Amino acid sequence: MTTVVEVDAVRTAVVQALADVEGLDVVEVEAIIAAGGGDGALQLDSKQAEVIIAFVEEMFGCELPSPVDLRKDQFSTVAALVDLVASAIVAPSEA
Amino acid sequence: MGTYVTGTDIGAAWLAAFRALHAQKGSIVNLAVDITAPMSEDVGVRHAIEDTLVGLRDSHRDFAGVQSMHTVANTVFPISLYRHGAEGAASRFIANALKGEQNRRHASHRRWGTYLGRLVAYPARDGQATNQLAINLERLSGKDRQWSDLYEVPIASPDGDHYDPDWEDLSRSSSATGGAVLHGDTRLDPLRRGGPCLAHISLTLDGGVVSMLALYRRHSYVTRAYGNFLGLSRLLYFMAHESGHDVGNLMVVTGHATVDAPGRANLLVAAEAAAGTSTPIEIGARPLGTTWSDLDLHAPADGASAS
């Protein structure tokens, strides 16, 4: 099933999922991302990415690729995960 | 005749095993490796192995997919999901592991699954998934009233037989055993190669100390063993710490231990030269925002896949 959403909603979902994985508030995660240089700078381990993707799959009711099938640069930052999810579920005009 | 070696930390134990393997031309049937202080490793030995792996990856097509020892360790216990010291760290780790399995289940490269998957969602006889990690943790913690009363319970089968008391140990109130099965049955895991090599994990609680025995049917000592020792040590820490106990020793027994790469003598020389610095292993996630890149193999020319 493909769900049409906007990129902003994808980023919100990824950050929420990261907060869930870490047991932190979204506000705390946003502060850590900002302090670390932004979405493209915060590094994620493949296992963290796997769990975040699973959370996002559940949020949007879709099936997404697994890190085991991806190159590291496709999942290893918040920005990369947003791109990954957006390329799968965002409407063409938004992507 | 089987072979027994021992080492204080992970590096020393791996080196002792590798020396034995080198002496026996790269192949030992029934090898037991005893790691007396599994919370420590020798990063010199680890880097010597990884330098060898980088050389193999860049020069042999058969080794194009080799992984760092951190990535190998992640297949047993991914530290990035364990926020050590945080409230509810154990339950969050288990919940995250289960969640990740949902994504892994439809991956193209899922093969038979992962060791972590077998630990938290073992395919039980009744078609359900058995969370072996949660069951064993609860029993080690003594939170289960029935377990506390029947403290001597072997958990050889995760989905049955838990409540059969071990009659040989009934009189010893400070001792218990636990187990986690990593293999499915021979119908579920028919592959001769490429299936799970780690077959079984036993945990023993004795005098407030949890020790681990891991059984491998086959173990590759260049590409996998050091990383597996690391992952098992982290799993041992998790089980001991989260149940309120101390960490004991780790023994890894292998039916067929092999040197699975060329250059055995060179690796032995390099590892021996690099050995000598024992440091604590990482046992939990790094603070969010910290790099993980230092745990990768040196970057390949055009990227690499995840574990």
Image (cartoon, coloured by chain):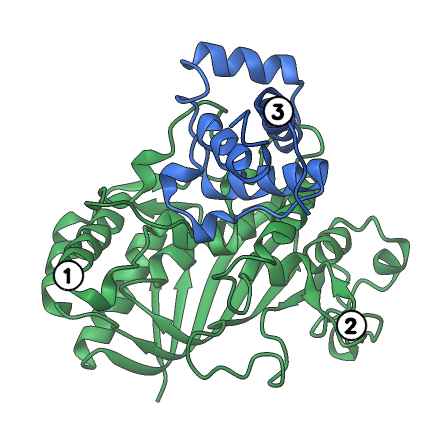
Chain colours: A blue, B green
Residue that sits furthest to the front in the current view: A93
Chain identity of mark 3: A
- Mark 2 — residue? B127
Left or right: B59 as drawn, with respect to B79: left
Disc 1: which residue: B267
Residue B137 position (above or below residue A41): below
Q: Is residue A43 visible?
A: yes
Q: Quadrant of the N terminus of chain B?
A: bottom left
What amino acid type is highlighted by mark number 1?
A: Leu
- Are marks 2 and 1 in one subunit? yes
Amino acid, disc 3: Glu
Do discs 1 and 3 belong to a common subunit? Answer: no
| Element assignment for label 2 | loop
2 or 1: mark nearer the eye = 2
Crowd rating for badge 1 (residues with CA inside 10 Å; few <14, some 14–19, many 20+)? many
Q: Quadrant of residue B43?
A: top left
Figure label count:
3
Q: Which mark is residue B205?
A: none
Q: Marks 2/1: CA distance? A: 45 Å
- In the rendered image of this protein, does residue A39 appear above or below residue B234? above
Give the residue at x 43% y 52%: B307
Residue A11 x %, y %: 57, 23
Q: Report the residue at 70% width, 60% height from top.
A: B132
For the question of whether residue B7 can be seen, the reply is: no
Q: Chain of mark 2?
A: B
Q: Dot 2 surroundings within 10 Å: few (below 14), some, or many (20 or more)?
A: few
Pointer 1 chain: B
Q: Which residue is mark 3?
A: A6
Q: Residue at x 77, y 61 (%)?
A: B173
